[in-house]
Amino acid sequence: MKLISWNVNGIRAAWKKGLPEFVAAEQPDVLCVQETKIQEDQITPEMKDLGGYRSYWSVAEKKGYSGVATYSKPEPLAVATAFGSPVLDAEGRIVQTEYPDFHLFNVYFPNSGMGPERLAHKLAFYDEFLALTERLRAAGKGVIVCGDVNTAHTEMDLARPKENETSAGFMPVEREWVSKLVAHGYLDTFRIFVSEPGHYTWWDVRRVGARARNVGWRIDYFFVSEELRGRVKAAGILPDIQGSDHCPITLLLG
């Protein structure tokens, strides 16, 4: 089973920049996209189908903001976009799809860059989300979490860690939560296969030439709960794929 996750930074823009062609070439079984920046009434039939997929969307109330969509060839057993939590439900950030042997969470985690209030919201979101996934694991089914986590976990996960020690997305309190996730038995699948630095998924467009010079951050992840480890066959990053300030990431399950 091939899964791809990609923060497309606006699905309408990504569509014009080759998203359908990318999907046709890669043929994932499941595609998770984040930051769709689209309202329900703006989603075209072509966007819903994407060449033969079922799609499931969560949109923000605020126009041009947030949003995620999961495209799936296999029909999920169940789909959820609301979880009874104002923190998790407010901004169109999660689509959960259930398959026979795992739950898949497609998540656009909050950014803390707008100040202390948003940092507090991000940390609350992190904690409520982990509690949600842990309840599902306790019920006996594995969990896969993918998307834009908006935090680089270790110094190896960004090009210039020293100058970003107090930057949003690399503050100790944010990194501690990713460590907490790992401590709860969620595996960073990319790091199962690649242990060296220099591999990134996001490049700041405000930095001229950042992508060309590979001055980036790895903030997009596939995490799997440890009971699924035996199914993980490969995980990767596709840095040459353009169309967004992020690049796609991949996970292959056996």
Image (spheres, rainbow, N blue to C red):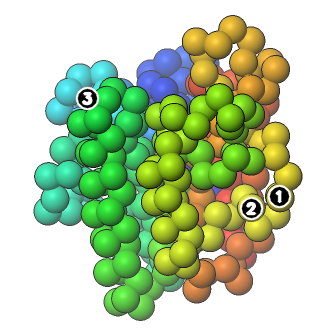
Q: Is residue 58 above or below residue 38?
A: below
Q: Quadrant of residue 99?
A: bottom left
CB atoms of marks 1 and 3 within 8 Å: no
Residue at screen point 85% across, 52% down: 196
- Identify the residue under disc 2: 191
Residue at screen point 26% across, 45% down: 121
Q: Nearer the viewer, mark 2 or mark 3?
A: 2
Q: Is residue 190 visible?
A: yes
* Residue 45 in the image, given as x and y percentages of width and height: 37, 33
Q: Is residue 52 visible?
A: no
- The three-letter code of the residue at mark 2 reads Arg
- Identify the residue under disc 3: 39
Q: How many marks?
A: 3
- The three-letter code of the residue at mark 1 reads Val
Q: Measure how far apart labels 1 and 3 are at the Cα level.
A: 37 Å
- The three-letter code of the residue at mark 3 reads Gln
* Residue 130 in the image, given as x and y percentages of width and height: 37, 68
Q: Which mark is residue 40?
A: none
Q: Is residue 131 above or below residue 73?
A: below
Residue at screen point 59% across, 81% down: 226
Q: Measure how far apart labels 2 and 1 are at the Cα level.
A: 5 Å
Q: Is residue 144 above or below residue 190?
A: below
- Identify the residue under disc 1: 194
